[in-house]
Amino acid sequence: MNSIPTPVKVIAWILIAFGLVGGVMFLINPSALIPGFNADTSANRIAAGMLAGRSLAMAVLLFLALRTNKPALLLPAFVMRLITESVDLISNLANGNASPGALGPIVLPLLLEIYCIAVLARAQLSESRRASPAQA
């Protein structure tokens, strides 16, 4: 596969935008993203800063992978996002935060990432199958 499928590109751009906005929001007003967030302790402020850094880094990683127009580089970026979203989901559920308002912003990107991984992996598998007879 020589280029990234258009639906994957669109989803990547959406996730980049959410990652950038989320990262900035974690820095400016974390309680807008985490209901009940309390910035009274340095530990909570540090955690918010770490979430901001993670969100911004993932957005930049997706952007750089997308700009290469190489699906082989974009696939690991989506896998990394899938892992972080999965940990967020587990953390929320383990802490009794199972409301749709809390889980929606995690589950929707998670489903989009699974879709993108499946599309990119399937395309790479098809390409490797086509290349195999030519190498023999």
Image (cartoon, helix red, strand yellow):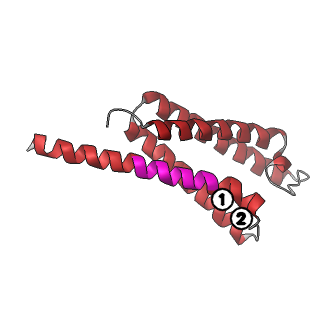
47 left or right of 17 in image? right
* Displayed quadrant of residue 59: top right
According to the picture, the residue beneath numbered tag 2 turns out to be: 92
In this rendering, the answer to whether 20 lies above or below 79 is above
Q: CB of mark 1 within 8 Å of CB of mark 2?
A: yes
70 left or right of 9 in image? left
According to the picture, the residue beneath numbered tag 1 turns out to be: 88
In this rendering, the answer to whether 76 lies above or below 88 is above
Give yes or no for residue 120 being in the magenta stretch: no
Tell which of 91 and 33 is nearer to you.
Answer: 33
Q: Residues within 10 Å of mark 2 (few under 14, many from 20)?
A: some
Tell which of 111 and 39 is nearer to you.
Answer: 111
2 left or right of 42 in image? left
Q: Main secondary structure of the magenta part?
A: helix
In the rendered structure, which segment of residues is drawn in magenta? 108-119
Name the amino acid, label 1. Answer: Asp
Could you tell me residue 16's position as x and y percent? 61, 37
The numbered mark at residue 11 is none
Q: State the SS at label 2.
A: helix
Q: Distance between the Cα atoms at labels 1 and 2?
A: 6 Å
Could you tell me residue 56's position as x and y percent? 65, 38
The residue shown at (59%, 60%) is 86
The residue shown at (78%, 40%) is 25
The single residue placed furthest to the top in the displayed view is 67
